[in-house]
Image (tube, helix red, strand yellow):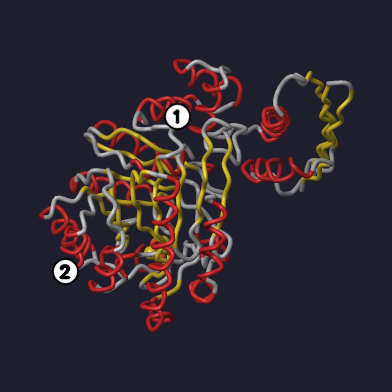
Amino acid sequence: MISTNKEDLSLDLESLCNSFGFVDGRIEHVEIETQGKITNEFKIVMPDQKEYFYSWTYDLDSTLSDLRKKSLRKRMVKNQLHKILSKHLNKTLPWGSLTGVRPTKLARDLIMYGEMKEYLVAEVLERDYFVSREKAELVANILKNQKCIIRNDNLVDLYVNIPICPTRCIYCSFVSSELKDVASKVDLYLDALIKEINAVKDIIKDKAYIVRTIYIGGGTPTVLTASQLDRLLNELNFPVSEFTVECGRADTITEEKLDILKKHKVSRISINPQTFCKATLKRIGRKQENSEVISAYSKALERDFLVNMDFIAGLPGEKIGIFKRTMDTALELYPNNITVHTLSLKRGSELFDESDKVSDKDVAKMVDYAESLLTQNGYKPYYLYRQKNQLGGLENVGYYRDDSICIFNIDSMEETNTIIGVGANAISKRVYNIENKIERQPNVKFIEEYMARIDELIERKRQFFK
Ligand code: SF4
């Protein structure tokens, strides 16, 4: 669909073509650099075989760092391709030419490099990246609500991964095993995980790190039994500002498990209905009753947990009316945080091969409805990210009310703090704020390999955090 002579631009250009739905035509791109000038040449062949040629030349400031030059080249070529596709397909995209970047992170970087003033965020995103006014204002609002960011290389977050779920949802591509397939290995997985946590404790001591937050995610961590949870949480005895456990599926939450989370000072949990429509729940493979969600939620409130609920716009078979009813019910429940995802068709998920079951017709209206409903009722957006192949080229947004921001969500999305990831498929990110550099180190993906290679993984982690 698109070819380019520059390998490093290929993914971004392809992603922009996908966002426009440009599948039946062809584009050839060539970038030429001569004496500080960059020329981008495009040949576009439309489905009716008509050909069009475009060429732009601009100066590349030689005093910029390599990183800034690379980001400027990408921005220029994506903007040019955006102009061409927008003109020939007579279409605009909510996020304009932004692909493969987190819009809030981009805005923060531009402010940091002195290329944009904070009060001009919306204007600049609209003017320079063709972002719609609504989305540009959303980014500006989110930046205002992210005041908890502290850039300090000694402040770290700890992420613990439990990649096991009761059953698999059809839209999910996470590396996560169904409990029935790994039930006999869970205790052995915990042995390896605790070994890694203990090694991390030594790293934290050696580096004089301060653990700001802990997040246990997955998967579905509450798939563990009460005594397995107790055993794991016994090892996570850091005095933190925030301790989150993603319970996810209401059918895994019991009073006994909630009491254990409370005993270990967990402050936040996530109960993720995704939808309150019974027919949709069946369609997406989530064996969950709405009564279980309500019951888990009231038990969590009785124990004073802060609660987040996740929902998805664009689930198969859902029209705007069903989504509105789900959001109205969510508002009645009034959890501290509500996260509204837009369905993403992920390679590796069951739904990816059945994409004809999905429609993006109403999805923009759904996302708009959620935003106005929530913001008119006291919620504020505080983090945002985009994924590949999201319906309508839209986004995921986390909302909070009162003072209930989840610091870990901001740290991980904005990449402002080091995250030490433990467990199978966990990724550690080391952030060097002064050098403006991030290094990543993933653990192996599957629990069997993780258990078999735990000593080697611990050694790799020690080297990574040297
Ligand atoms: S519960 Fe969450 S992690 Fe598990 S399969 Fe469903 S969406 Fe994926």
Secondary structure beneath disc 2? Answer: helix
Please, is residue 448 above or below residue 175 in the view? below
Q: Quadrant of residue 235?
A: bottom left
Q: Earlier in the sequence, mark 2 or mark 1?
A: 1
| Element assignment for label 1 | helix
Residue placed furthest toward the right:
34
Q: Label 2 vs label 1: CA separation?
A: 40 Å
Displayed quadrant of residue 76 = top right
Residue 130 in the image, given as x and y percentages of width and height: 59, 26
Taking depth in this image into account, of 67 and 59 the one nearest to the observer is 67
Vertically, is 26 above or below 169?
above
User: Residue 178 or 388: which is nearer the viewer?
Assistant: 178
**Residue at the location (79% across, 20% down)?**
58
The spot of residue 167 in percent (x, y) is 39, 73
Left or right of 164 in this view: 460? right
Q: Which mark is residue 437?
A: none
Residue at horizontal 40 percent and vertical 62 percent from the top: 197
Residue that mark 1 sits on: 139
